[in-house]
Amino acid sequence: MKHSFTKKDLTLFEEVGISKDDVVTQLNLLEKKTNATELIRPATNGDGIQVLSEKQMHDYAAKFDLEKEFFSIVRFIPASGMATRMFKFLHFFIKRYNPDEETLRSYLNRAKTYKLGIFFGGLEKLPFYNIIKSQTIEFQESSFQHDYRYLFIKKTLEKLSTLPKALIPFHDYGGEIRNAAEEQLFFSKEFMISNNSMKVHFTIPPASNENFQNSLSKCIDKINKSASIRTHVSFSHQKRSTDAVAAKLDNSPYRDQNGNLFFRAAGHGALINNLNDLKEEVVFLSNIDNVAVAPFHKKAGFYKKTLAGVLLSTLGQIYKFSHVLESQNPTGLDVIITFIQEKLNVEVPKTLSEEDLHAFLKQKLNRPLRVCGMVKNEGEPGGGPFWIKKSGQESLQIVESAQINMSNAAQKDIFKSGTHFNPVDIVCATYDHKGNKYNLKNFVDKDNYLVVEKSLNGVAIKAIELPGLWNGGMADWNTIFVELPVRTFNPVKTVNDLLRPMHQLI
């Protein structure tokens, strides 16, 4: 389909920071279906996933502690997401319950809402319970007109559901409340301190810098005084130039009532640009909501250091072999081949000429490296580790269900048979053996995209969405998977998760 654009459109492209050709490319891709990933088999213990002994873990953690001061280190935490989904079932309740027509007890008996039952059963254990209670006059007066629990939910949604998840109260330390971002800073002390300082970078929603700075300033002062360190916190926003143009279902560009084109955020994978802007050599990558209360920080930090030790150990070998391959008469290629196949999970073709083999080995070594923790699959929604095939090459990838053609029974069965889950516990190395930073955008699988359908102002639209940062965004990285205990995974997907033991002081 040919597309023509007005002068107003071209001005908008300039404002967004996207070229006309890129817009046309997106619109052409929307005429196709999602480019599904081809699964070969799940990654399992001994077949793509390393299982370390307790001694190995301690050795790797010790290696990181010994060598970390020779590297610049930063923690990268995507925190752009809003808290809306956390409170989804409460929004559902408020829309359907009319306190003037029936009692809350009657509604609960009729609706049999399991999630509401858990919420009400743990109401006083919620970290924001006293905050909301103090702001609800009717609650304090024990109003006979409306059940206090209904009033509590209304005030909770009013005060919290429009905030970024990072700023939602997560943990209560006897009256000292920490939101998710604050708790992540306290947790960072267990593994991030190097040369008496630590750096943490958050990607946050546009125009929220002041809210984050105000929220974290006291926390930073407290950490600096208690640990005698310097804490450096920085922020960035998902770049508008990564937004995707929306189209109607007939593939024509969507225009609003004023004739304007509409761009929407293209998904988590766009954050590869933010990660690429960081100058540090070693990057710890985590989700904002995966953080437990303080008594569990030390042990969780130990596993972070274990992953980082695996990274530094592997990186040392990569650098050594890269220098060997650059010598005039490289020797020991068999050792390099074994390393690439057994440690980096890359199959080396057996039919290559000497010249092509040399080039292949150099190319496979000179890529960014990521070491990813994996936990046993306990039915959590999300992606996991799989062997995939593309262009005749097998590789280890983190794959989400949305990337799979679930109408293909064989592919669906492979995905369902996955033994491990991706908790987004990743440590990255982004510099080569010569000290040059990789351009991470050169290692993205640009064919790895989703076509998503949404509703906008009552009109069905579709747009390109990039898979998660650790899916298509890191598809051409060297990848190592390491099994971690499932207790390192403590996400808060719904507000009820805050009632789980790992989010409560015992």
Image: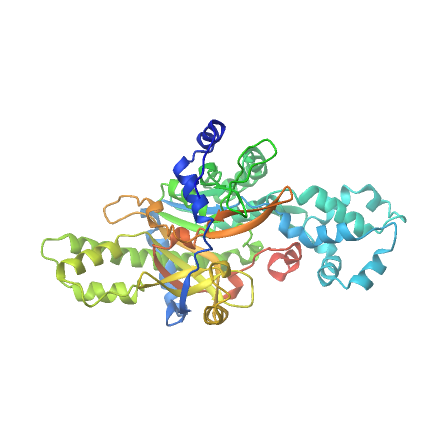
Q: Is residue 398 above or below residue 26?
A: below
User: Picture coordinates of residue 69 (x, y %)?
Assistant: 34, 47
**Quadrant of residue 119 in the image?**
bottom right
Q: Is residue 358 above or below residue 194?
A: below
**Quadrant of residue 164 in the image?**
top right
User: Picture coordinates of residue 54 (x, y %)?
Assistant: 41, 69
User: Picture coordinates of residue 471 (x, y %)?
Assistant: 43, 55
Question: Is residue 321 visible from the viewing direction of this image?
Answer: no
**Quadrant of residue 232 in the image?**
top left
Q: Quadrant of the N terminus?
A: top left
Q: On the rendered structure, is 442 left or right of 300?
A: left
User: Picture coordinates of residue 100 (x, y %)?
Assistant: 88, 49
Quick one: 448 or 46, which is closer to the camera? Answer: 448
Quick one: 414 or 378, which is closer to the camera? Answer: 414
| Furthest residue toward front | 1
Q: Quadrant of the C terminus?
A: bottom right
Question: Is residue 146 visible from the viewing direction of this image?
Answer: yes
Q: On the rendered structure, is 211 left or right of 357?
A: right
Quick one: 441 or 207, which is closer to the camera? Answer: 441
Q: Is residue 200 above or below residue 42?
A: above
